[in-house]
Each structure stands twice: as structure tokens, then as C-alpha cells.
Amino acid sequence: MEASWTVDQVMQDTERFLHGLGLPRMIRPDGLGTEYAFPTNVRQLTSLQLGELQLRLTAWFTYLLDVQGKEEAELGAVSAVFKIRLGVRVHELRATEGGRPPAQDVLEALAVAEQGTDLRQLQQNIIARGVRVRRLEAQAKIYAEQLARLSREQSRRESEMRAPGA
């Protein structure tokens, strides 16, 4: 089965659409290096250090959301193509079965296991992208929690400055 479009074409069309909206493209931020240690006691940070860490984490958090969005979009496109191609192949297998055809699950497994089709590669792509999306979601939660902790510390400091006798 030959598709009139590919996942790559869909993703390129999406990028052109976003560009047409005038949205600026995210670039990879810098400032944290490849690894960083979140402070165990944010009260020890100076106000400048607190603000700088918030800016850096926010840059990485928003960049991560951009990457996650792209992965989720590609996962959706690959899944849709897989579902269509799998449905066509299962229909073909069912038509060749004499008597009572095997269960849907069996036909799907046979279709994916066949040599000479791209179904196995598409399924592996879906699995890999799904794992990446879940990992990106976990990292986003980490950044959100760290940013919330820094924000609470900033609010605490501001509250102390406004308190009588401060």
C-alpha cells in the first residue's frame, strides 16, 4: 500500500503552518550544562542566584515542552499511518483465510510479523516515541516542581520584606 503522503510530509506541513503563524522557533537554551544539581536548600541561594536559576529552568522547561509537543505530534502521525496500514493488511489477511478467520489480535500480530512490510518498523517507531514522550513528560514534571519550589521561596522572601519589623 502506497500512501499519498508520509509522516515527514505531515510534519513539514505542520512546521510551515506554525511558521506562517509567525511563532518564533525555540532554540536549545544554555546555562545549565549537560547536568545540574538542584539546591537542597533554596534558602541558601542569594536573590540573584534564585532569579538566575528560575530563568534557566524556565528556558529549559519551555524548550522541553516544545520538544515534547513535536514528539507527541509525530507519535500521533506515525500511529495514524500504522493504524491505517494495519487495517488494510488485516483486511487482506482475513480475505485469504478459508473458513473462520483467526481473532483480530492474531491477524494484527501476523501482519506486523510479516517480512516485506513496514508495519514492524512503524510499530517499533510508535513504541520508541511513546517511551520518549513519557520520559519528556516526567522531565517536565521535574522542572515544574523545581520552578514551583523556587517560586515559593521567592514569595516567602517578598512576604518577609513586607512584614512589620522587617
Image (cartoon, rainbow, N blue to C red):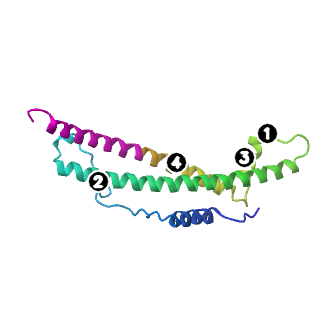
Q: Residue at 27% x, 48% y: name it.
A: 37
Label 1 vs 2, first from the N-terminus? 2
**Which label number is shown at residue 131?**
4
Instruction: Give the CA distance from mark 3 to mark 2.
Output: 48 Å
For disc 2, the marked residue is 55
What residue type is disc 2 on? Leu
Image position, residue 144 (x, y; %): 37, 44
Label 4 vs 1, first from the N-terminus? 1
Which of discs 4 and 2 lies nearer the camera? The answer is: 2
SS at badge 1: loop
**Which label number is shown at residue 126?**
none
Report the side of 161 relative to 70 (left or right): left
Depth order, front residue of 27/112: 27
Magenta residues span: 139-166
Instruction: Give the CA distance from mark 3 to mark 4.
Output: 21 Å
Instruction: Give the CA distance from mark 3 to mark 1.
Output: 10 Å
For disc 3, the marked residue is 109
